[in-house]
Image: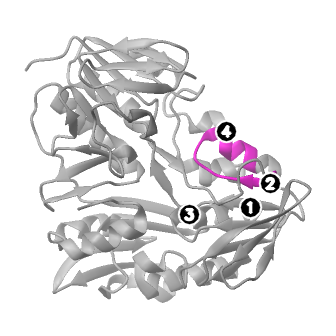
Amino acid sequence: MSAPHDVLVVGASAAGLATVEALRRKGYEGGVTVLGAEAHLPYDRPPLSKQVLAGTWTPEQARLRTPEALSALDAEFVLADPATRLDAGTRTVHTMSGRTLTAAAVVLATGLRPRTLPGQQGLVGVHVLRTLDDALALRADLGPGRRVVVVGDGVLGAEIAAAVSGLGGPVTLAGPQPAPLAYQFGPLAAGLLAELHDARGVELRLGAAVTGLTEEDGRVAGVRLATGEVLPADVVVVAFGAAPATEWLSGSGVLCDNGIVCDSRCRAADGIYAAGDVARWHHEGLDALLRLENRTNATEQAVAVAGNILGDDRPYTPVPYFWTNQFDARIHVHGILSADAEVSIVEGDVREGRFVAQYRRAGEVTGVLGWNMPKQARLRRQEIAGPAHSTVTDLARLRGLSMS
């Protein structure tokens, strides 16, 4: 097994940290540098829209590792210094502060940037939720009587609405779908989510796209729908998707097209790899380019990248998986779901709030959804057949996956 003299990881993210840890577990003893745009040591993002936002966790509890555990990795963490330019030919990264870092292998794990609404920039009371600082700023803006409108009826928007609904003010969830996650989960599970949010006091204003914001004296005052209606708001959270953070790679020699385009080994160029939300790689099992935006993939793909850096030469072919917690619902999804799939309950009972739903297309099982039955859903993943190309396309459109 051959190993590079040193490795540079761009992104102090879950994927970035998992790459370093996997390299060390696999016996790599060379130098490792981790370059982070934020001032924070690596932390976990899923708790931001749940425990951190709800105030049940402190920011320290979201840390992925203790300072002692990070020190044991014998890696240099360079924080609060975003990468600004890459020369793929020499594997050299330039930073905002003027640093120049060159390595035998470079791992790109820069994640995503939130999408925004027209007129959002500079408007007081409008928030996104991607970073720890975002979560803390949003929480500080909440309070008794504050009217909150969450723009986005996907996973993140629904999680935010659930988290802030108990913090003192009325909460409205707005978006174009007929129910939260309807285009992905289909009518049964999405309908149950809608009932859950409604029962917990979240007002659902779904079925109409959001077109913009209104303001008074520099502060947000409302959310305008495509119908012309304006939803009054003191605080607005924009959570309708994110885009790969690849602008800094312009002219680098690395192909970027809705993510960093990679081969089946997650390799974007000679000695250049990508992992996590930003990576769009060739999934040999699907014979398609795929990009997954979830925590599990960030870790698993990082392990695959570390192995390939060290000479494993193995394709990365995961079964897609993600989870979401909303109120007392713990939802785990394996494989590919789509709104027009044939859905059947194979374990549990919908009326009892514990079940496993099986999704079929063209007679094949393409995915399973567990509602408060995580173990049973995990065991059912072995029934999943290879997803059809059309099914993957459906999910790509709905969850930020990208394929071609």
Q: Is residue 235 above or below residue 211?
A: above
> How far apart are labels 4 and 2 at the CA level?
15 Å
> How far apart are labels 4 and 3 at the CA level?
19 Å
Q: Label 3: few (<14), some or many (≥20) within 10 Å?
A: many
Q: Secondary structure at mark 2?
A: loop
The magenta span reads 124-138
Q: Kindly check if marks 4 and 2 are in contact, taking CB atoms under 8 A apart as contact.
A: no
Q: In the rendered image, which residue does mark 3 sit on?
A: 240
Q: Which mark is residue 236?
A: 1
Looking at the rendered image, the disc whose residue lies closer to the viewer, 4 or 3, is 3
Please report the residue visible at 32 percent of the width from the left and 54 percent of the height from the top.
Answer: 291
User: Which comes sooner in the sequence, label 4 or label 3?
Assistant: 4
The type of residue carrying mark 1 is Val
Looking at the rendered image, the disc whose residue lies closer to the viewer, 4 or 1, is 1
Q: In the rendered image, which residue does mark 2 sit on?
A: 125
Please report the residue visible at 61 percent of the width from the left and 82 percent of the height from the top.
Answer: 208
Q: Is residue 171 above or below residue 111?
A: below
User: Which comes sooner in the sequence, label 4 or label 1?
Assistant: 4
Please report the residue visible at 55 percent of the width from the left and 33 percent of the height from the top.
Answer: 63
Q: Which mark is residue 133?
A: 4
The type of residue carrying mark 4 is Asp
Q: Secondary structure at mark 1?
A: strand
